[in-house]
Amino acid sequence: MPKALITGITGQDGSYLAEFLLARGYEVIGMVRRTSTINFDRIRDFQDRIEIVQGDLLDQVSLINILQEHRPNEVYNLAAQSFVPTSFQQPVLTGEFTALGVTRVLDAIRIVDPQIHFYQASSSEMFGKVHEVPQRETTPFHPRSPYGVAKVYGHWITINYRESYNLFACSGILFNHESPRRGLEFVTHKITHAVARIKLGLADELRLGNLEARRDWGYAPDYVHAMWLMLQHDRPDDYVVATGETHSVREFCQVAFDYVGLDWEKHVIVDPKFHRPAEVDLLVGDPSKAGRILHWEPTVTFQQLVRIMVDADLTALQQTGNHSPHVG
Ligand code: NAP
Ligand code: F7E
């Protein structure tokens, strides 16, 4: 039975990846950091089928010990401080988690078992102020936030360990991917949750920042499939994972409000509080390399994604009377 270690298992992607690997007969080890209150909402449904171990990207010894004790065949490094606005408020901590944390995991692999296949969660935020449209694996990086800068470091240290120590280390440059399990602070879930609340008469307005920003939004379960495919290939490499379509925040609002028969312009208020010190205006990926080599392609369209998320929020609110953001 193959064994996989997932850092960040309590996050959106970690929870989908764990389910995906369990369905393929993997033994799944999930690394969680110590917190005073346990937050296993996203993994509650299959918690008894995985092994939870305590460790932290800030603590090298904990990473080495986990690898020595569990001897996984594959390591998926999904843990990170992943919210861009927080990276402006806590730039040093973001660098510790999201940049240096990658080196700690790679070095633990180099020390304990260099045969491990390693996946690094790189990001389209690395392209930032884009140098070409669409963005592909060879597009130069120009990050626009401490988060983006940290991800560039994580990307290059992954390549460096592959070239220096011959590790099977892959970097997936994933464009935004969403789901009902997305954190409520990210714009897609913030919108669909507000749409559901407004529809049910629980709220009346939605305050947002830049409505003109454009993103290439895909469906998270499709994207964890791509992560796995990278580690099954006979050669480690880096891949853009995206839909190839771009839509603005404004369009996302339109489609989400329309779906429940509401006029978005009556409810959305632009609040400068949500503007960022530097913005990423336009992202759209070219996933043709992943299509050609991994035979990966997205299965959910933009319209379907919006509907999946609005439906899940409506159902959760109707069932609980309040929100249950991470379930579904
Ligand atoms: P997420 O929901 O924010 O989950 C992040 C995970 O990292 C959580 O499980 C969190 O644990 C864990 N974590 C944070 N700091 C840690 C530390 N010091 N030690 C151990 N664990 C720590 O993120 P996601 O959307 O699933 O994304 C997964 C990865 O892909 C991240 O690296 C993200 O930057 C990257 N990425 C995401 C997207 C996207 O669109 N979703 C696109 C490209 C790349 P707690 O539950 O304890 O907070
Ligand atoms: O913002 C604009 C905002 O926070 C998207 C992370 O998973 O994807 C994510 O990063 C856009 C930005 O995601 C609000 O200015 C407008 O232009 O949903 P977001 P993100 O910053 O693109 C990448 C690929 C990652 O790797 C990251 O980890 O929406 N926007 N108004 C807003 N954004 C938020 N959050 N809230 C607003 O009110």
Image (spheres, helix red, strand yellow):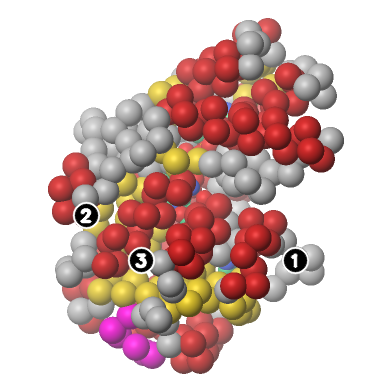
Q: Residue at x 24, y 33 (%)?
A: 134
Question: For the residue marked with disc 1, what is the amino acid?
Answer: Ile
Q: Which mark is residue 294?
A: 2
Rendered location of residue 290, percent (x, y) = 22, 49
- Determine whether 17 is above or below 268 in the image: below
Residue holding disc 1: 38
Q: Is residue 197 left or right of residue 275?
A: right
- Per the image, label 2 sits on a secondary structure element best described as helix
- Give the Cα separation between the discs numbered 3 and 2: 15 Å
Q: Residue at x 84, y 35 (%)?
A: 321
Say which quarter of the image contains residue 312.
Answer: top right
Q: Is residue 179 left or right of residue 34?
A: left
Q: Residues within 10 Å of mark 3 (few under 14, many from 20)?
A: many
Of residues 282 and 149, the one nearer the viewer is 282
Q: Residues within 10 Å of mark 2 (few under 14, many from 20)?
A: some
Judge whether residue 195 can be spotted in this image: yes
- Determine whether 129 is above or below 118 in the image: above
Say which quarter of the image contains residue 284.
Answer: top left
- Per the image, label 1 sits on a secondary structure element best described as loop
Rendered location of residue 319, percent (x, y) = 79, 38
Quadrant position of the N terminus in the picture: bottom left
- Give the Cα separation between the discs numbered 1 and 3: 26 Å
Q: Which residues are magenta?
A: 111-116
